[in-house]
Image (cartoon, rainbow, N blue to C red):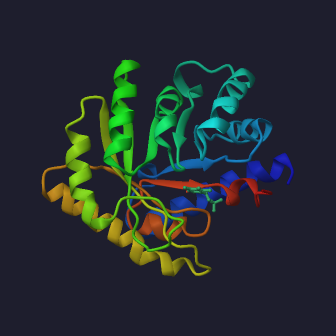
Amino acid sequence: MGSSSVFENVQEVYRRMSHAALRAGRSPEEVKLVAVTKTVSVAWMKVAFDAGLRVFGENRVQEARGKRPALEALIDTGAGPLRIEWHLVGHLQRNKARAAVGLFDLVHSLDSGQLADELNRSAELAAKVQDVLIEVKLSPEETKHGVSRNELADLINTVKSMRHLNVRGLMTVPPFCDDPEEARPYFRELRGLRDEARSEGFDLPELSMGMSQDFEVAIEEGATMVRVGTAIFGERRL
Ligand SMILES: *Cc1c(COP(=O)(O)O)cnc(C)c1O
């Protein structure tokens, strides 16, 4: 894929996002595009940056640890419009919590009380309040991470009591299917869980849901962040 196509893909994804938002009677500004850059080189990330992307999502702490300084060296980052947000969208192991706090503005994958403890402690040491989303597992595949529906309320309560964590919302990864409509019930359920928590007094504004395959459906169902890799950078070679 050439750099002009990455540039065009970004415009095309923004266009589709905005149509989906308008279809649902929402404002396109309510939805943030997180460019998922696992396995994507820093040179391509720079092209995406030049196309206007400012939020990058990585899957692994190790990979981000190398790429963050490398990308920042290519860009004269600082304050204002050049500021990049780094998100961790993949599973986080407890022994990497400290590194994650040093690298990421938002962790999408908080899924246990123990990980919350570890992140809270690390954030305290770093004199930081770490923004997090709670990952909810709504389908039974064993490869999936996330807290179950039944454990969600307890985890929200636990995290809310931690002074160095700020829980901003919920995240989910539905089972992969060819037809994006099959993901719709999962997105709707995540939103329902968020609304339930809200009715109990917990403000959780963010819903991180939707990937290349199904981000338009997710936006129709209320996503405030979509995590898109393939539709921007092409198929990953693993
Ligand atoms: C890889 C990944 C994405 C992006 O997937 P695409 O299908 O390439 O858009 C989104 N979220 C998570 C958690 C991922 O691991």
| Above/below status of 70 relative to 194 | above
Residue at figure coordinates x 24%, y 29% from the top left: 163
Indicate the position of residue 50 as horizontal and vertical percent values.
71, 36
Residue 203: in sight, yes or no?
A: no
Left or right for 92, reference 194: right
Q: In which quarter of the image is ligand 1?
A: bottom right
So how many labels did they put on this image? Answer: 0
Residue 177: in sight, yes or no?
A: yes
Q: Residue furthest left?
A: 200
Identify the image quadrant of the C terminus. Answer: bottom right
Indicate the position of residue 222 as horizontal and vertical percent values.
38, 63
| Above/below status of 231 relative to 164 | below
Left or right for 165, reference 103: left
Identify the image quadrant of the N terminus. Answer: bottom right
| Above/below status of 191 relative to 119 | below
Residue at figure coordinates x 74%, y 53% from the top left: 233
